[in-house]
Image (cartoon, rainbow, N blue to C red):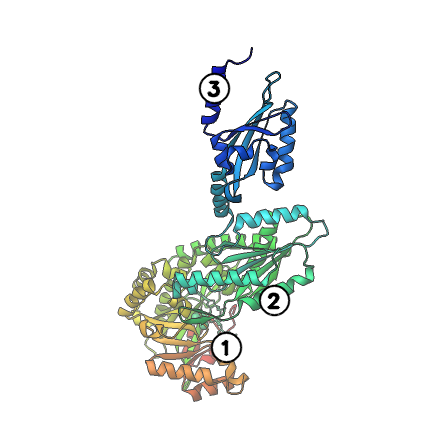
Amino acid sequence: MSPSPSDGALTRALFESHPDPSFTLDRGGAVTAVNGAFAAFVGQPAEAVVGRPLAALVAEPERAAAQAAVDGVLAGVAHAWQTEFVGPHGTASLAYVTLVPLGVEGGAVAAQGVARDVTVYRVIEEQLQERVFTDPLTGLANRTQLLEAADRAVRRARPDGHLALLQLDVDDFRLVNDGFGQQAGDRLLVSVAERLRRATRGIDTVARLESDAFAVLLDGAPQRDDVHLVVARVREALGAPLTLASHVVRPSVSIGVAHWDGGASAVELLREGGLALAEAQARGKGGLAVYESAMHAAARARVELAADLREALRRALADDPAEGDGGLGAPPADGLWAAYQPIVDLAGRRVVKAEALVRWAHPARGPISPAEFVPMAEEQGLVADLGRFMLRSACRQLRAWDAAAAGRTAAVGNVAVNVSGHHLEQGTLVHDVHAALAEAGVAPERLTIELTESVAMRDPERVLPMLHELAAVGVRLAIDDFGTGYSSLAYLHRFPVHVLKIDKSFVDRLTEEPRGDVLARAMVGLADALGLQTVAEGVETEAQHAQLLALGCPLGQGWLYGRPSPGALLLRALGGGGTAAHATVCAAA
Ligand code: C2E
Ligand code: CA
Ligand code: CA
């Protein structure tokens, strides 16, 4: 039965008014009719399209696939696929095409198609992809894209191929962010990103993983030995001076390197890079470490040690107040304890103060350096507990010294306790200080809080009121490691500082370099001008002692006068004449 004329008119009307671009093809694959939507879609009038092969309307790279689909449908097989037509003014019009054979006996039309316009989806998709795969601040790849790139590289690489991952972390980023403002922090990150891109090849993937953590996937070419050249190039590029909020900084990064061993997955490669970075950071600013399998074991050991530290702190804080360290002066074989290092007046070499330094005797490993476990306490959120323990120990020790001196003049006047920035940030410091003082019945003037410049600089708006609160009741504040921070000295006017502790590096310079006294002299002068006391740290030799005395530095601390030791031993030295040289006891220092 052939369609009646009115049926034909209806069909044509339906075809014409169809909202999706629609077309029909003849037995040769040429277009016989298109509707208005199709003409608009390809940006050409119907007359210009009719008679041409469908494949000719499709963008060049897609033509062969389109021709195959047409051939298929002419052989009776329906087909649906996504393709790209040449749209108005040569733009790309993306379509999802459904092509079905029309089995009308003897008819001129062999197939009918609908090309659904999906151009808009592509745009959204691209935007989504961009969000999913790139870091909006720097435009670099993000972790997801890096992982994909690493995955592709790993699957493509031959087992003997070379592939390396650098993971980088900007040193002291928080100082910039908190000290100079987030805008400055962002600028630093953006310039690190640019410099990284310039220092690497186009085929390398440069990514920002989070905050101030970056990574570079070195694909293909670099031989194992070449990677250190890349590292050197990256270092040099990053270290160029940069002005942020009118401060000149030279960014430095810690770098962990993982070489692909021919077997690792992309995820493993990233984990290895991360372990190497952790090791590099543990080596200090600008550190570099290459992943070794031992790092897995080291990471596991760190987790175990952190658990031991948690337990040691729990026990130390649960200790009965009466038990303290008033006794024999022998350091405990297990657990946390406070050692005290004398601070002497340089002219008379008499002990006037002491600094409390935490010690940890691990039951299995023996003494562990605070340089190892204090950062661990910070990472594990234990540092406020550590601070509480040290504040309490120091206040009790003052009382124990008083009691033992029993009226003799040689009691230690003041004890300094080191406080970590994390403790300050947790907001409990003021309370913890008051609690320790009250429990031992010690006057606030006898306690000094030691902070580093960087801690004082961090979030000053929050930190400043706390420090003023402590100063108002009489607690002293010392700036530790003075001269080693990022700082501008302006903060000295704003902070209620009483003491500057000149870092050991400046004391070392006194006798090591010609004119090595310039900086120490300037610091003593600055302190005098501001009405602050100076303590020279790490004094080891008589020559240093003599120089410091000549510079007018009033106080000193160091092995020359006494090593950190149990409180009772320091006391014994005082009792026996009061010169610090008697207190030279090496206690896990
Ligand atoms: P710091 O506060 O600068 O402490 C001075 C460090 O120099 C101590 O190392 C001390 O033993 C060492 N020292 C003193 N005189 C000399 C000397 O003449 N020559 C040499 N070479 N070294 C000397 P220690 O006890 O290993 O502490 C290292 C760091 O760990 C401290 O540096 C401090 O930042 C941190 N720390 C120590 N105890 C505590 C604590 O109770 N709480 C916190 N938050 N940090 C602590
Ligand atoms: Ca200190
Ligand atoms: Ca120090």
Name the foreground residue: 495 vs 266.
266
Could you tell me if residue 548 is visible in this image? yes
Disc 2 to disc 3, C-alpha distance = 77 Å
Question: Which residue lies under the disc numbered 1?
Answer: 505
Earlier sequence position, callout 2 versus callout 3:
3
Q: Is residue 412 above or below residue 439?
A: below
- Work out how far the residue at label 1 is from the one at label 2, CA to CA, in angstroms: 26 Å
Q: Reading the chain from its start, which is encountered first: label 1 or label 3?
A: 3
Judged by depth in the image, the label closer to the viewer, 1 or 2, is: 2
Q: Which residue is mark 3?
A: 9
Instruction: Determine whether 442 is above or below 23 in the image.
Output: below
Q: What x and y, as percent, mark residue 272?
A: 60, 53
The answer to which of 61 and 189 lies nearer the viewer is 61
Q: Amino acid at mark 1?
A: Ser
Please give the count of numbered marks on the rendered protein: 3
The quadrant of the picture occupied by the N terminus is top right
Q: Which residue is mark 2?
A: 232
Residue at 61% in and 38% down: 62
